[in-house]
Image (spheres, rainbow, N blue to C red):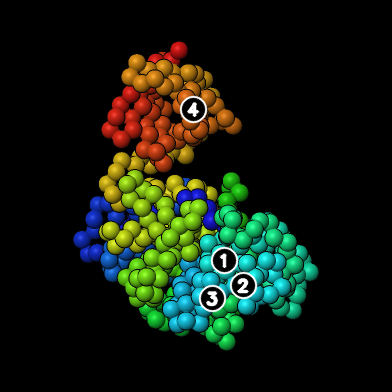
Amino acid sequence: MKKILLFTVLYFNLTISAQVEPKLQKIDSLLTYLENNDKFMGSLAIQEGNTVVFAKGYGYSDVSTKTKANENTKYKIGSISKTLTAVVIMQLIEEKKLKLETPLATFYPNVKNADKITIEALLHHRSGIPDYINQDSITSEELKAPDLKEAIFTKITNYDSIFEPDSKFQYSNSNYYLLGGIIEKVTKKSYAENIDKRIVSKIGLKNTFYPTKGVQVSNNEGFSYLHDGSSWEKVEEWEKDTAYAAGAIVSTPSDLTKFVSALFQGKLIKPSSLEQMKILKDGYGKSLFQFPFGERRFYGHNGKIEGFNSTLGYYPKEQLSISLLVNGDNFNTNDIMIGVLSIYYKLPFPFPSFKKINQELISKYSGIYISKDIALKITIFEKEGELLAQATGQSSFLLTMQDEKTFIFAPAGITIIFDQNNLILNQGGVKLNFTKE
């Protein structure tokens, strides 16, 4: 659930326009390539304006029964749930049932510093309340409690504050767990009912809900998996209400792109409320943050729960929505999204090679390289059987082999071509020549 930072046959389980765009074909090829190499299982949707132009599932929703995923397979979305929670809170503020300045003491007076912690501080992760998931652990006794949700509320109430409210940002799932409870106390209805009435039914989502039981494959829901080097291993499901309003919602990429598009089109909250959500404090808004792609700035959120990884983004200028939900995690999700967006915007993106570089090439290319073109040295070196590069004064980065001479670092658009005792670094159309010292 914790914030983490910041895609054969096209007519099968693939929704796109009748005239398939080459860039969408290439996105599909990338995700199929990753799937075939046991690097990825999941689903992607891309929405332009109000039209979903790409939606497809990859891999299995249930590996044990070989149940194939499709574009409507439902996955747990982790902390993207927080954005839906925040929308309900903003709706209650519009209805004058809450204020951003309302103190937490109104609802949970026994939480430490409750009189100083506001709704706004909870939304921005500026409360000083420890994270019951990542800074602590839920005990077996708590998991066996008759009411797990109440046990977690008690756990949160017993914490000591770790900093003065609103003095700094520190991500804590406890904040949104409390916001879920506040929603229930204000509306006298369950969190699940509020999500359904205020978001799902309001904009016509078909596959989004708060789960009341474990994964139901018969309902086209998917388990999550990690790869052990030879096969996909199912990740144990969390107990009901463990994540609650901080990360338990189930959805599909197409529903999520529809949700974020509706949010930015004013169909869920007023434009003034959306502007409030977009205000960043230490890089985090009211359950929205920005992630860059070149000169573009997407608004969205991502999440992680069990073995699921999720990403949702919206670029207002182009009214572009994109969501990637991963239930088979064996490759960096951020790198997958970089690949998808690179292809979508017709930027160079060579597919990664999964062939291991041999020791002969590592020895051949390792060393320090200097250039007459720029006052910068590049060190090429080995770490745990991989080839890395590091420029003077910068962090090292992993090189992915495209062929025996060509290596890439996709996140920065870098291509390095080796030749004897030389290398050419290509980035953004600029070529720099380096010679080994």
Count of marks overlaid on the render:
4
The answer for how far apart the CA atoms under marks 3 and 4 are is 47 Å
**Residue at the far bottom in the pictured view:** 188
Indicate the secondary structure of the residue bearing disc 4: loop
Residue 189 position (above or below residue 226): below
The residue carrying mark 3 is 210
Q: Who is closer to the viewer here, 76 or 177?
A: 177
Residue type (three-letter) at the residue carrying disc 4: Gly
> In terms of sequence position, does the residue under pointer 3 or pointer 4 come before the other?
3
Q: Who is closer to the viewer here, 381 or 42?
A: 381
Residue 421 sits in which quadrant? top left
How many residues crowd around disc 3 within 10 Å: few (fewer than 14), some, or many (20 or more)?
many
Residue 135 position (above or below residue 229): below
The answer for how far apart the CA atoms under marks 1 and 4 are is 38 Å
Q: Position of residue 38 (x, y in %)?
A: 50, 50
Q: Which label lies toward us, 3 or 4? A: 4
Residue 122 image label: 1
The residue carrying mark 4 is 393
> In terms of sequence position, does the residue under pointer 1 or pointer 4 come before the other?
1
Residue 104 image label: 2
> In terms of sequence position, does the residue under pointer 1 or pointer 3 come before the other?
1
- Is residue 408 found left or right of 76 in the rendered image? left
> In terms of sequence position, does the residue under pointer 2 or pointer 3 come before the other?
2
> In terms of sequence position, does the residue under pointer 1 or pointer 2 come before the other?
2
